Every structure is written in C-alpha cells, then in structure tokens.
Image (cartoon, helix red, strand yellow):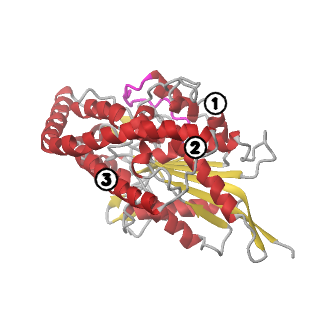
Amino acid sequence: MDTDLTEQHLIVLVHGLWGNPGHMECIKQSLEAKYPPGKSSIDLLVPKSNKGFASYDGVKIGGMRIVEEIEEFIKVNSQPSNGKQKVYTKISVVGYSLGGLWSRYAIGLLLQKGLLKTPDNPDGKLEPVAFTTFASPHAGTSFHQNTLRSNVSNALGKTMLGQSGMDLFLQPVTIDENNKDPRPVLEQLADPNGVFYKALAAFKHRMLFSNTINDRTVPFYTSYLSVKDPFKQHGYTHVVHKPHPDLDAGSDDSEGEEGLQPLVSTSSTKTYAEVDLFKSSYKVPDSQTKSNSIRWEELQFRIVFILFSPILLTVFIPVSSISSLISYHRIKTYEVQYKENKSKTTEVTKHNRRRDSISEGVAEITAHAVDDFFGTRNPEEESVSEADETDDNTQSGDVSDQKGLCNVVETPGLPDLGLSPLEVKIIENLNRLEWEKHAVQFKRLHSHAEIVNRRNKPGQGEEVVRNWVKMMDEKFAAL
C-alpha cells in the first residue's frame, strides 16, 4: 500500500532559566489556535530536558539536550500511520531568555550533524525558516553600573547559577577532554567563522524582542544587540519611535503621538513600539539632578537589600549553591554518556516525574525570590511615560530607513554603557546579520516574565505574542 507523504514544519519553543514548558504555553496555544494540531502542516515541540535546575547546566549542555529532543521527536512522529507519513522539511526556533542561547547552540549542532539545509549542505533535511528570541541575553547579562545592585547581581550571577551563570557572565570555558576551546561560550556563538554563527545566518528570518524597561534579568543592550541604551536614564532621554503600519494597534481609540503607532494599547499605556535609535538622543541632566537620582536609587536598593536579605540567605544562596554542585556532577555524567551514545534525555519514569515536579517547584520559588529581590523600580523608570509621551514629536540625529533597526553601533548623544570589548565584539558580530528588532515596553514590574506571558494570563504579554504569531504567519505564507 502506498504511503501518503506530508511535509511538516517543526517549530521548537524553548523556555529559559528556572523555567519549564509551561512558561511557553501562551506561545504554544497562540500557534495552535492559528495552526490546529493534526489539521495543519505545522507541529510544535516544547523541550522538557532543561526544566527546573537542569537549566543550571550551561549553554552547551542545554543545546545538546534540545538537539536530542528534536531528533527523537522527528524519529517518533515520522513513523507511518494509517497510510500516512510525516516528513519534516522545515524548522523554526523560538527561544525565551536563556532559551535563546540554548537554541543558538542547538542549531549549530544541527548544522554540524548535517541536518540543516544550507547552500553548503544542500542535502540537509531541514530548511531553516525563522529564528526568534524573546528577552535573550545574546551578549551576556553583566551589569556595568558601580552600584550595590550591579555589584550584588554580578557577584551572585557568576557563582550561584552553575555553568549557566559562568556562561552568562562571559567566563572562560574550562579546558578538558570535552572542551577544546577556552573562549566563553557566547563568544564562540558569535564567531562569524564558527558553526553556530553560520547556522544562525542560514535562517531566512531572524527576529528579536527586547524589553526596554523593568527587565531586571536581561538588560536592553544585550537582548536588543545594541551598544547604546536610550532607556537607561529615562527621565533624560528623548526617544523617537517608528510606526508599525502592518500590525494591530490594539483596542485603544486614541491616535497616539506623531511617529508612534503602538502594536498594543491598554487604555493610555503604550505596550509595544519600534524604537529608532538613530533619531533618539540623550538629554544631559544637570549634575545636581543626576546626583540626587543616583543617591535615591542606591538608598532604595539598600532598603530592599536589608528587607529581602532573609530570602537571599535562606532561599536563593543555599538552594543555588547546592543546585550548582549537583549541576557540575550532572554535566560530567551527561558528557560521558553523550560520547558513549547512552544519553536518554527524553526518558521519563514515575520517580523522575516526582523528582522533576519538586525541582520545578523549588526553581519557581527561587525565580520569584530573585524577581522580588531585584524588582525595585528605578526613579528614572517612573518617568518613562512622561519621557515617551512628550518627546516623540521632536526628531534629532541622523535619519535611517534600516528595516528592523539593524547594525546599531553608534548613536549620537547617547552615553556609553561601559561595555567590555568582548561584549561590544559579540554585539557587532551578531549585527552583521539582518535582524528584525522589536522593542517592547511594559509599564509594570517584572517585564521579563510578561514578554512571553509566562503566567499565561490575559494582558499585554498575550497581545505581544498574538502579534508575533501574525508576523510569523505572514512569513510562512511567503514560503
């Protein structure tokens, strides 16, 4: 009996640090609403192997696990059934936060294995279509201000998040039989001559979404790939937006300011807008105003530091320290099993499910504790609405029609961020590629979770996801 072959497009949805597949549920449900399971040519995979404290195991191991799950998914779902057989011919990837880095490592491995179809590998089975990241730290997550908040964040991040913390803070790789390249993993990912960069370049579309404010986990510069940040000192920044003529403007009936058509509006709140960094400029404050602002920010954080120190000492530090030690052992075991082809990432038992459930719960509590600890709002961010709503009518600086705001290197008037030469190198290398960049603005705390609607509740994040699905649908229709 002849088998009816149907070509399928696989979309992989990857959560982030301390995460679990449920964090991608809003994206998953939004895609399924557009492409009903079993009734469309699109299948979804939400990898499970990096959930909870397994997310401490680093970019490399996380990427390797994702590749295992992709290969297993394709193998299982390509089996003939009732005279029909799926053939996976296309792949798209969506990474949230650290998941964006795991995904970039994973696609490099897919290319290395010969699975991605590229000009140099025309026999590859999977045509790379779209690669999207939401609030992903492409250049790491170092904080550059000489403040208590930054110093605490940098110190804890390097030491309390396992190998993932080492990777995110651009620490050199330990050389052993499994690691021959001493460069930080994120530097390897951004090497134009490397397999990871070439895999990223092979995708027809590259998109990124970045929070402009209130993201205590992933700063704007690293998720937007920019050496400038017009949102750093919101009270003194003149931000110019670009219109989005082809996307939904939400239910708000107001016309909005000149040059700004928000994708989503809730009452008067501008949720999502594209920022023109070439037209934006920095208004230098008088020294007294700036000094008062810095002193207030430090005082505010010191108060929060004192209040939340019990949480830091009793939850985050002990749990993360133990989890980091377990992670290092797990990494060594995994690498040995992987070399011997014995790794079984997707194997699930009742014991594993019970253990994973506990791990996910503790990881979720830890994530909330960190959000609460670092979730204080800067005084500059209090004034962002006034800055955005009053300054859009004036334009300054050079005009650029670059679609997606790519290759942002120098922007007149904006202050330097104090980035390291390596961070600048990573950003400049990745900006050689063409990106569609979208700045997202939530006027609420914890925008890092909101950008993918991590809690899967109605709100601004849901609208951002909905509009992303619309963008994707237009791209898929053009294939």
Q: Is residue 406 magenta?
A: yes
Q: Main secondary structure of the magenta part?
A: loop
**In this rendering, the label closer to the viewer, 3 or 1:** 3
Q: Position of residue 47 (x, y in %)?
A: 53, 55
Is residue 232 among what the camera can see?
yes
- Residue under circle 1? 192
- Residue under circle 3? 362
Tell me where residue 339 sits by quadrant: top right
- Residue 64's disc is 2
Graded by Cα atoms within 10 Å as few (under 14), some (14 to 19) or many (20 or more), the crowding at tag 1 reads some
Amino acid type, residue under disc 3 in the picture: Val
Q: Secondary structure at mark 1?
A: loop
Tell me where residue 299 sits by quadrant: top left
Q: Nearer the viewer, residue 60 or 132?
A: 60
Q: Quadrant of the N terminus?
A: bottom right
Q: Is residue 135 magenta?
A: no
Gap between marks 2 and 3, in whole Å?
24 Å
Amino acid type, residue under disc 2 in the picture: Met
Graded by Cα atoms within 10 Å as few (under 14), some (14 to 19) or many (20 or more), the crowding at tag 2 reads many
Q: Earlier in the sequence, mark 1 or mark 2?
A: 2
Gap between marks 3 and 1, in whole Å?
39 Å
In the visual, does 8 lie left or right of 21? Answer: right
In the visual, does 444 lie left or right of 255? Answer: left
Q: Nearer the viewer, residue 254 or 176?
A: 176
Q: Secondary structure at mark 3?
A: helix
**In this rendering, the label closer to the viewer, 1 or 2:** 2
Graded by Cα atoms within 10 Å as few (under 14), some (14 to 19) or many (20 or more), the crowding at tag 3 reads some
Residues in magenta?
A: 404-420
